[in-house]
Image: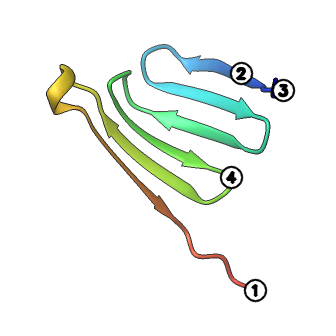
Amino acid sequence: MALMFRKQVTLIPGLLRLNAGKRSVSISIGPRGLARTYSTTGRRTTSVDLPEPFSWRTTSHRKRRR
């Protein structure tokens, strides 16, 4: 069984949330069901959750410089 950690803290109710996980921290802006998320790993996610056949989510990664 894998060890998992996830914590979500609401900073501004219905608008701004701070998410902490095992590998990164992220911030979500927007109401539930319509949000933009920025992660410390460079991942940016936009999600729209509508009734089942219409849910949509896209994720992009920032290229890291070496």
Which residue is the site of mark 1?
66
Which residue is the site of mark 3?
3
Residue 38 falls left or right of residue 55: right
Tell me, yes or no, whether the two marked residues, 2 and 3, touch with CB atoms within 8 Å.
Answer: no
Residue 48 position, x and y percent, is: 28, 34
* Mark 4 crowdedness (10 Å alpha carbons): few <14, some 14-19, many ≥20: few
As drawn, 22 above or below 45: above
**Residue 17 is drawn in which quadrant?**
top right
Tell me which amino acid carries mark 3.
Leu
Mark 2 or 1, nearer chain start: 2
**Cα distance, mark 2 to mark 1?**
31 Å
* Point 67% across, 56% down: residue: 41
* Mark 2 crowdedness (10 Å alpha carbons): few <14, some 14-19, many ≥20: few
Tell me, yes or no, whether the two marked residues, 1 and 3, touch with CB atoms within 8 Å.
Answer: no
Q: Nearer the viewer, mark 2 or mark 3?
A: 3
**Cα distance, mark 1 to mark 3?**
31 Å
As drawn, 12 above or below 48: above
As drawn, 18 above or below 43: above
Which residue is the site of mark 2?
7
Tell me which amino acid carries mark 4.
Thr
The C terminus: image quadrant: bottom right
* Point 58% across, 38% down: residue: 27
Residue 6 falls left or right of residue 28: right
